[in-house]
Amino acid sequence: MELLNIKQASEWATQYLGKNVSTSNISYLINYGIIRKNGQNGSILIDKNELLNYYDSFYGNRKENWKEQFGNDLNCHLSFEWLKEKETTKHVHRLHPYKGKFIPQLVEYFLDQHTDNFKRQVYFEKKDIVLDPFCGSGTTLVQANELGIHSIGIDISAFNSLISNVKLAKCDFIDLHNEIKRIENALKLFVSENNYLQFDNELSDLLTKFNKFFFPAPDFRYKVRQKLINEIEYATEKEKEFLPIFQNLISKYNLKIVQDKNESFLEKWFLQPVKNEIDLVFSLIKQTKNAVTKKILTLILSRTIRTCRATTHADLATLVEPVTSIYYCAKHGKICKPLFSILSWFERYGKDTLQRFAEFEKLKTPTFQYCLTGDSQNIDIFAELQKKNERFFDLVKAKKIKGIFSSPPYVGLIDYHEQHAYAYDLFGFPRQDDFEIGAMKKGQHKQAQENYVTQISNVLKNCKKFLAENFDIFLVANDKNNLYPKIAELSGLEIVNQFKRPVLNRTEKDKNAYSEIIFHLKEKNVDARI
């Protein structure tokens, strides 16, 4: 056994893999029981052979396995699997969670001015205009701004449009900082005047002691991975053991945990003390005078309450059942509790938002960006843009839109309004669920696929009216049903190239890799520039 400390393990792994492996990466493997911790008297040592076996099993023959699974035409260069999550969620890209978005590096690859063995020509120049008719959370718009390219987004969801436009807004940092502090101070006072804070602190202390004894980290996780402990049986037993302690605390502080009604999203998925704080903060945001600051604060609150839903840590992305008591958390390998206050998360996200805006401010270019709310199948882009920004409208009308980069929704995969149901419920945004293309509730059956083909074709035909001659369209799709050749035909387009990539760096609960294609489409009978 050759033992390494964390720093030595980091240096060895970096050299062995040919990519940066930080001490945090090594600590993660230890904390989650993937690699066993050795050593005595507080020292942490790692068996080099165990680390070697892990990396060989994780990285060994990966590209060969991907090609065997997805085909030999796979472009592994576009996996971006060497990037850390911090890079794929840089600056304002993580201003608010959004399920189903692509990473900024993929957008940048096709919009910037580099060429390589795969991308053999430049499609967009500085000061061009790019359109994203399925704008989502605005990734294309943000990256276009970084690259000095004007951009227009369209989304059927009013909340999605808010996310996109807030990311690109001109932030008054002093005003935002002052307003965040004003709300934080009022929230702290409100929390201090009720019993929930004392209850939560005592509960946290008891849980810490309980977990330290019965779920010691990282030993417990390691024993579970080695099948030395039956996780379900053991966790169920300990959960029952702690439950009376939790119930006694509620009685001690005479608390009301569950709301009286269970009809709306805010009633079902938030505990009573959390709902009280949400109502307070929302009322304080309404008092904000600066319109842009008010929208940013709205997004901070939305991000906060998403985190504070009464659900398990493992089910944050896809809700299952409300949680109103302590529970065993398979994600963290210990007994966890629902949240009883939004204070700490509002403080954290307020600080994070200021930092992300500051980071993006250094990269922003003096270009136009705007996300319109509407149906891309029939929206008059020029008319709607003129209502929002006369100068941008004049530029777009004179120059026309150079092309499209977008990721249309997949068939029957996500209900985009429902993923932010809490925001629609609280802020009163109009819902347009029935106009979503490919919504999960519409299914993946044959008729759903045919409707999808028609609707995506309608979007492309409508958007073509606003494009410049010799335009380029790039659509990112997991086309497992081979729908895009028909979509291209109905739209009067032809697929001139395809870039097939493995999708590996996933944050969803289902982390299995899959492949997607970036379809390059052009007007039919126009020579392709490839």
Image (spheres, rainbow, N blue to C red):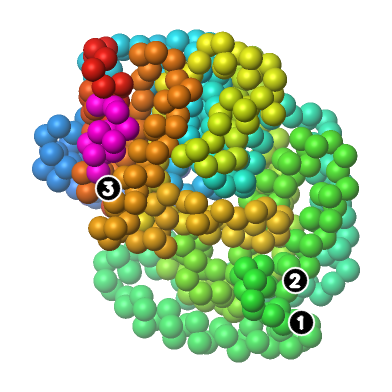
**Which residue, given by chain and number where applicable, does mark 2 sit on?**
273
Residue type, label 3: Ala
Q: On the rendered image, what quadrant is the C terminus found in?
A: top left
**Which residue, given by chain and number where applicable, does mark 3 sit on?**
513
Image location of residue 184, percent across then percent down:
82, 51
Image location of residue 432, percent across then percent down:
56, 53
| Left or right: where 335 falls relative to 461 | right
In the image, what residue occupies the spot 48% across and 31% down?
A: 132
Q: Image quadrant of residue 478?
A: top left
Mark 3 → mark 2, Cα distance in angstroms: 40 Å
Residue type, label 1: Leu
Among numbered discs 3 and 1, the one appearing first in the sequence: 1
**Dot 2 and dot 1 residues touching (CB under 8 Å):** yes
In the image, what residue occupies the spot 47% across and 51% down?
A: 436
Image location of residue 31, percent across then percent down:
42, 55
**Dot 3 and dot 2 residues touching (CB under 8 Å):** no
Residue range of the region highlighted in magenta in the rendering: 483-494
* Element carrying mark 2: helix
| Above or below: residue 274 compared with residue 46 | below
| Above or below: residue 32 compared with residue 276 | above
Q: Within 10 angstroms of label 1, few (less than 14), some, or many (20 or more) residues?
A: some
Q: Within 10 angstroms of label 2, few (less than 14), some, or many (20 or more) residues?
A: many
* Element carrying mark 1: loop
**Which residue, given by chain and number where applicable, does mark 1 sit on?**
255
